Amino acid sequence: MKAIAVRGTKDVFLHDGKVFVERVLESAKDFSQNDKLKTFSNLSTYLSFETLLKANGIPCCYFTKPYQVNLSLSEIKNLWERERGCFSCPVACLKATQKGKFLPEIDALTALGPLCGIHDVSAIFDAYDLCVKTGLDPVETGTTLACLMKLGEEGVLEKENLEIEPKFGDKEALLKLLAFIGKGEKGSSTLGKGAYQLSQHLQKPDLFMGVKGRSICFDVTNLPYLGLQYATSNTGFTYLSGPTFLDKGLKREEIPGKVKLVQDKTAALEAMGICPYVTDGFALDVFLSMFQAATGIELEEADLLKIGEAICNLEREFAQKAGVDLGTGTLPEKISPSGFKELIDKYYQLRGWK
Ligand code: SF4
C-alpha cells in the first residue's frame, strides 16, 4: 500500500468563524514580518545546510566518510525556480523547477546523493523524481540502497544473485534499483522494507544506522541537539519532530530541556493540524488564539505544552504495545556524540521515563 486518500463531505463548524478568519489573516500578516519564517520560506530545509556541512553532518558512502564535495548553498538555490506551497500556506517552502518538478529536501538529497556516493545533483534530482512518481519514501529508500552498497562492498551480497550490482557512486545502478523497488518487482520486497530489515535479513544488524528501525541520514556526532531529537523521537529519525531550525549556541545542559520542549510543542500543534515545519517559527499565542476561535476552548501556553507531553507519552505507550523496540534512546555507536549518555539520562529524567 502506498497511499490512503480521504475526502470529507460535511461542513466544518467553528466556534467563532469570523474571529477565526481574523486570526488567520493576522498570522499571515505576522508571517510577512517574521524573519525566521521568511528565511525558512526562502531556503526551505536547506536552512540547515551550512550548519550540517560545518559539523561534518552530511555523510558519504553510508557513513564511511564525511561530505567533501564543494557544493554551495547558492549553487543549490540556483536549481530551483519556483516556490510552491501546500494549500493556502503563506510559507510556501517547497521548491520546484520551472516545469513544476519538485526538488528534494535536504534529507532526501543526502540519502539519495552523498550517502550513495553520488554527487551529481541532476542524477539526485532524477532519483528523487522517480521516488515521488512511484510512491517511495526517498529518505528511507536512499539510505537502504546506501546500506545495500555498503553490504556489497563487504562482499555480503555474493549469494543474493542481484541482477543490478549496487556500487557507491553508480548513478545508473541507483536509478535501476529505485525502479526495481518502485515497481515492486520480484525479489524487491526485502529492499522495500528498509535498511533495518535488509541488515537483519543479511545477518549484519550492526551495519544499520538508525533508531527504532528507521534510518538516519545525517551524522550527528558533532550535533548533540539533533542526535537527541532522533534518539528520543517516538517514530525514529525524522526532523518533523522539530529541528528544522537547528539550535546553534545552545549550552550543553540546556539541550535535554529544549529537545523535550520542542517535541511537546510540535506534538500539540500537529494535533491541531499545524505543519511541523513552522512550529518553531511562530509564537505559541498565535496558534492558541486560532484554537480558541475554532473550538471555544481557552488554553494557556502551559496547558498546550502539557497536552503535547501527554501526546508524546501516549505515542510511546502505543509504540511499546505495538512491539517497537524503544531501547533506551541510544544512537548507533559510530555517530553517537561524546557524553551522549548523560544527555539521554537527563532527558529521560525530565520525561519521567525509565
Ligand atoms: S504547510 Fe509546511 S510543508 Fe507545506 S508549504 Fe507550508 S511550511 Fe512548507
Image (spheres, rainbow, N blue to C red):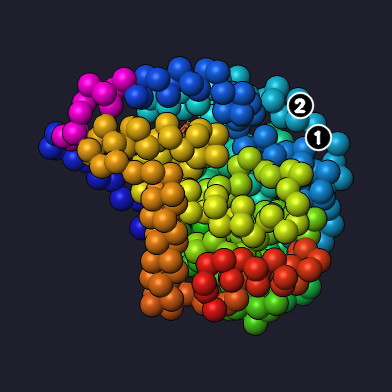
Residue 124 sits in quarter: top right
Q: Residues within 10 Å of mark 1 (few under 14, many from 20)?
A: few
Q: Residue furthest bottom?
A: 203
Res 158 seen here: no
Q: What amino acid is at disc 1?
A: Leu
Residue 123 at x, y percent in the picture: 68, 39
Q: Nearer the viewer, residue 18 or 138?
A: 18
Q: Which mark is residue 240?
A: none
Residue in the picture at 69% in, 55% down:
254
60 with respect to 257 (left or right):
right
Residue 310 sits in quarter: bottom left
Residue 188 at x, y percent in the picture: 52, 65
- The residues tagged by marks 1 and 2 sit, at their Cα atoms, a distance apart of 7 Å
Residue in the picture at 50% in, 62% down:
235
Q: Secondary structure at mark 1?
A: loop
Q: What amino acid is at disc 2?
A: Glu
Q: Secondary structure at mark 2?
A: helix
72 with respect to 166 (left or right):
right
Res 47 seen here: yes
In the picture of the structure, the residue carrying the numbered disc 1 is: 71
Looking at the image, is 209 positioned above or below residue 68? Answer: below
Residue 201 at x, y percent in the picture: 58, 78
Q: Quadrant of the C terminus?
A: bottom right
Whether 199 is among the magenta residues is no
Residue in the picture at 40% in, 20% down:
26
Residue 339 at x, y percent in the picture: 79, 68
In the picture of the structure, the residue carrying the numbered disc 2 is: 75
Q: Magenta segment, which residues?
A: 12-22
95 with respect to 248 (left or right):
left
Q: Residues within 10 Å of mark 2 (few under 14, many from 20)?
A: few
Residue 14 sits in quarter: top left
Is the residue under label 2 in contact with that under label 1 (CB below 8 Å)?
Answer: yes
